[in-house]
Amino acid sequence: MYSRIITTLLVAFMGTSVFAQQAVEKYSEKYPSRKLTTDLGIGIPIFQTLIPERDWLLGSQTQFNLNRKLSIISHTGLLLYASTFHDAKDYLKTNHSYSLLQKFGIGTTFYTKGTANGFFLMGGFKYSSVKSTMNNPDFPQQTMSYSSLISDYGVLYNLKVGKKKYFFSGRVYIPLNNLPLEPFESSTIELGVGTRLIH
Amino acid sequence: MKRLMPFMLLLLLSAACKKVKINPDFTRELTINSQVKNKDYHIKVQLPEDYYSSTQKYATIYVLDAFRSTVKDFEFVSKTCKDIAERQNTQNVIVVGIDYGDARENDYTPTATDGNGGEASRFTDFIEQELQPRIEQDFRADTSRLRRTIIGHSYGGLYGGYAFVKRNNVFGNYLLLSPSLWYDHEIILQYEKANRPTIQNNLQVIYLGVGGVESYMMPPIASLYQTLTKYYPNTKSSFEIVAGEGHMASVHKDMEKALNYYFINR
């Protein structure tokens, strides 16, 4: 099933790319050229879309267009795991549980009327820290904390819709490390708003 | 950049769709109509590649949740065992995959909570009275406890913990990946405490693993590990954390660690 999901996402990714490529000539003049943009977004892991207990991702992205086709991008995120938001159950309490994400990428952008479709190869790191406590009266209190730093790389599709200075943004990130399970669990979708910093 | 994009995407596509391949010539499938559980269990067996050219008996690894489409537990365990056995130049094992059908929450849980679950005891009866005799009759599987291993993830790990503390005669090695030891107020830890005098001197290998961001899973697992190191002089045990990974993303890395630990310490 995972390969079908990934295949579908990547085929959609390629299809959008081809569509955007065809449309680029027609609309390239109508999309406002932005040199430097930044936006803030909020998102969730895609596989958690239909379940009630969700992780939440707060993200910030900055994009610098080297020219009309080539862009570099930086994405910073704070991923708060679902257990952070729940009360203690079964004598277990999560003290904290989060990951800090920092990725840089390079890619290309295709413009259609009022939109910009960006496709990026991303690479960076993920720092995670968790701490939780078991307070079962039948056993000694047990607190466990753990931190780690791992690499994180994948592909990012970034959509911007807007005119003039402000825009709405939406992005889908698919990690490609630890295949095939990482994309299944850690692909994220974010929605946000942004602004142009330098024209 | 624009010209390179399709090639890069094709490369990513092929990487994303890579499959775990095992040799189908050594795969057998059977269905056991369980009298104990009153249901059919679909079983897959992966034989070592030297099976037909030798007369020796083999250790067995029983894989729970064997046919999950995301994880492909049976294929992954079979492939990893083959790789490790080749790398270590040691005897491979017979891998037995057990389908859970529609009863995972029932078969793998020791007690009923909210009116569901609590069939672990009868599921163990099925394994002990019907599955293991069939495997050991149809294939050259070693019948000794120390040559039987159970591997399970999540509720499957919970069941492995149950087998360890309550039915210690059925398996001699327990590879527990992100086991849900929180279940029913850490009931497995309670069972362990109660049964400790009868099982603590047994020879066994126990691997405990968890993903690095599975916060609430960790304390009960750490607690069990500390108990093992303190009170179980003849048990080889290990507690590993898969850095930065969650409940599902950690499975394959954890399985590799667990199987390596088993092959080295069996």
Image (spheres, helix red, strand yellow):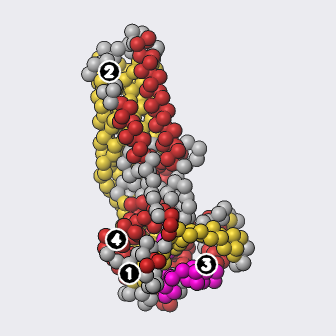
Do tag 2 and tag 4 residues touch (Cβ < 8 Å)? Answer: no
> Depth check: A13 or A95 in front?
A13
| Of the image marks 1 and 4, the number of the one nearer the N terminus | 4
Residue type at tag 3: Leu
Question: What is the magenta range?
Answer: B128-153
> Depth check: A82 or A102 in front?
A102
Secondary structure, mark 2, is loop
Q: Which residue is mark 1?
A: B266
Q: CA distance from mark 3 to mark 4?
A: 28 Å
Q: Which residue is mark 3?
A: B131
Question: Subunit of mark 4?
Answer: B
**Same chain, labels 1 and 4:** yes
Residue type at tag 2: Lys
Q: CA distance from mark 2 to mark 4?
A: 49 Å
Q: Which residue is mark 4?
A: B86
Q: Is residue B135 left or right of residue B34?
A: left
> Which label sits in the foreground, 2 or 4?
4
Q: CA distance from mark 3 to mark 1?
A: 22 Å
At 65% from the left and 70% from the top, the residue drawn is B31
Q: Which mark is residue B141?
A: none
Question: Subunit of mark 2?
Answer: A
Q: Is residue B26 above or below residue B126?
A: above
Residue type at tag 4: Glu
Residue B112 in view, yes or no: no
Q: Residue furthest front?
A: B53
Residue A141 at x, y percent in the picture? 43, 70
Q: CA distance from mark 1 to mark 2?
A: 58 Å
Secondary structure, mark 4, is helix
Query: Would residue B151 be counted in the magenta stretch?
Result: yes
> Which label sits in the foreground, 1 or 4?
4
